[in-house]
Structures are given as C-alpha cells and as structure tokens.
Image: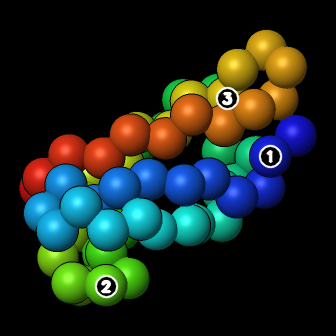
Amino acid sequence: MDTTAHYYCAHCGEGNVVAVDIGGGTKQEYTEDCQVCCRPNVLTLRFEGNGSARLSAKQE
C-alpha cells in the first residue's frame, strides 16, 4: 500500500509529495498548503483496490 502520493499544485503547478494516511478510509478530502508557493490546495485522495493512492488537487 502506498504511504506517499504526488500532486501538482493547483496554483503554481509545482510537484509536491505528501504522506497519506492509509487508516483514514478509501476516500479522503483535506486541505494542504503547497510546499513551494504555500497556497492552499484541496486534495482528494482515493485508494485503489491494489493499494495504490490517487491524489488530485484543486484551488481552495
């Protein structure tokens, strides 16, 4: 099972790697600041049946 996931900031487009909480359920949504521009992104995390994490970002 993945313990990290990658997303591109919805504001500046830079890549970010974040730790994911596998105990939080198969679908999660939370806000995280970009590690480059510090602007907030709403992240949607889904775990696939094979344990891989899919992460998408949109502007808050």
Going by the numbered disc 2, the residue's amino acid type is Val
The numbered dot on residue 36 is 2
| Crowding near the residue tagged with mark 1, few <14, some 14–19, many ≥20 C-alpha atoms within 10 Å | some
Instruction: Tell me which label, 1 or 3, sits earlier in the chain.
Output: 1
Report the residue marked by disc 3: 47
Question: Residue at left 66%, top 65%?
Answer: 19
Residue 54 as seen in the image, left or right of residue 8? right
Residue at position x 31%, y 84% in the image: 36
Dot label at residue 51: none
Few, some or many residues within 10 Å of mark 3 (<14, 14–19, 20+): some
Q: Position of residue 6 (x, y in %)?
A: 54, 55
Q: CA distance from mark 1 to mark 3?
A: 9 Å
Residue 1 vertical position relative to residue 41 in the rendered view, above or below: above
Q: Residue at x 70, y 20 (%)?
A: 48
Q: Residues within 10 Å of mark 2 (few under 14, many from 20)?
A: few
Residue type for callout 1: Asp
Say which element carries label 3: strand
Tell me which numbered mark, 2 or 1, is placed earlier along the sequence: 1
Quarter of the picture holding the N terminus:
top right
State which tag comes first along the sequence, 2 or 3.
2
Q: Amino acid at mark 3?
A: Phe
Q: Which residue is labeled 1 in the image? A: 2
User: Is residue 42 found left or right of 16 in the rendered image?
Assistant: left
Numbered circles on residues, count: 3
Instruction: Check disc 2 and report its element: helix, strand or loop.
Output: loop
Residue mark closest to the camera, 2 vs 1? 2
Contact (CB < 8 A) between labels 1 and 3?
A: yes
Quadrant of the drawing holding the C terminus: bottom left
Mark 1: secondary structure: loop
Report how far apart the C-alphas of labels 2 and 3 lie in the structure.
25 Å
